[in-house]
Structure formats: C-alpha cells, structure tokens
Amino acid sequence: MSLTRFFPRTIPTPEQIAPLYRDILKGSDIVITDNPPNLDELCELEYKAFWLATGDAHCNSIFVTTPGVALRLTLKHMNEVPALLKTWVPDTRYFRLTALVINMVKGEVEEVPVERKVIIPFHRDMLYEGLQLDSNLPGIERLAEMAEQAIQLNLVSEKE
C-alpha cells in the first residue's frame, strides 16, 4: 500500500488509514511490511493504523542488516524496538525476533549473540539482477523455516 496513492498531499492520521487497512487485511493471516533501518514517524503511523484496524498489536520481526552500517548498531536497534512499540501502542501484546539476517557478507562474520540468525553471502550479480524466484541463495531456506515456525506459533497462541 502506498500512502501517496491515497493521501498525495498530506500525511494521514492512523484513524484515516485504519479503514483502508481493514479492507486490505480482510481474509489475510499475515501482514509483511518493509520498514527502514530506523523506525520513523511513518512506521509509527502504520503500526497505530494496524492496531486501530485490527484491535491487535504485536510484532514478529525479521531484521536485515544494512551493508555499511555497523552490526552493533543493528543489534542495539533490535533491542530498542520492543520498548518503542509499547510507547506507540501500550496494548502491544508481544514482540518476537523471528530472525536476524546478516546480509551481503564478504568473508568471516564476527560472533553475533543472536540465536536465530541467517547469514546471506555477498553475490555481485544480485546487485544488478536482484533476487529472482529461482535464485540460489544459501540461507534463504533457513529463513523461510524460521518464518513458518513464527506463523505456526502465532496461530497456536491466538487459539489459546
């Protein structure tokens, strides 16, 4: 969903976005958003609108490192997100780290104190071609398994 398509001249409020979300989310079990490395006002807007549209607020997160940004900064940011989400929506039920993707790795990776991590090696051709459906990307299968486990965990916990 592109906010500029619906609100080309202004930044909307969460209350304005919530009805659009309700329509988009009908029949959906999973919502995937692509957020910038640092959560900003638009991320806050999106999170609050989701809460207003669904009456629920939680987060299963996959963090992807940004090449050129120190890994320690990504780890620090990961640790700050749960508290930030709680300030945006105090009723946030939970925050779960589904995985940390260490992206475009050249050489050895330093010790990373994260259990659920996936290391994606650097592939020069992907800079020009992007990720294709038939791309052979070591680690992507493990990431898909982690995401499936998170989805199953959510389905079970919602039934309880």
Image: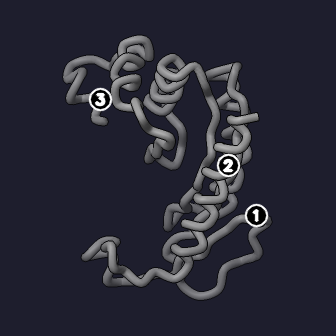
Query: The disc labelled 1 sits on which kind of residue?
Result: Val
Of residues 24 and 77, which is closer to you in this image?
24
Query: The disc labelled 2 sits on which kind of residue?
Result: Met
Q: x and y percent of residue 99 in the render?
A: 64, 60
What number is the disc on residue 78?
A: 2
Q: CA distance from mark 3 to mark 1?
A: 34 Å
Quarter of the picture holding the C terminus: top right
Of residues 67 and 84, which is closer to you in this image?
84
Q: What residue lies at 75% left-to-right and 69% top-to-bottom?
A: 112
Of residues 125 and 21, which is closer to you in this image?
21
Q: CA distance from mark 1 to mark 2?
A: 11 Å
Residue pushed farthest front?
A: 159
- Compared across the picture, whether 64 is left or right of 2 comes to right
Q: What residue lies at 62% left-to-right and 22% top-to-bottom?
A: 88
Please tell me whether residue 130 is drawn above or below residue 38 in the rendered image.
Answer: below
Quarter of the picture holding the N terminus: top left
Residue corresponding to mark 1: 114
Residue corresponding to mark 3: 3
Q: CA distance from mark 2 to mark 3?
A: 26 Å
Badge 1: residue crowd in 10 Å (few <14, some 14–19, many ≥20): few
Mark 2 lies on a secondary structure that is: helix
Of residues 43 and 22, which is closer to you in this image?
22
- Disc 1 to disc 2: CB gap under 8 Å: yes
Q: Quadrant of residue 108?
A: bottom right
Residue 59 visible? The answer is yes
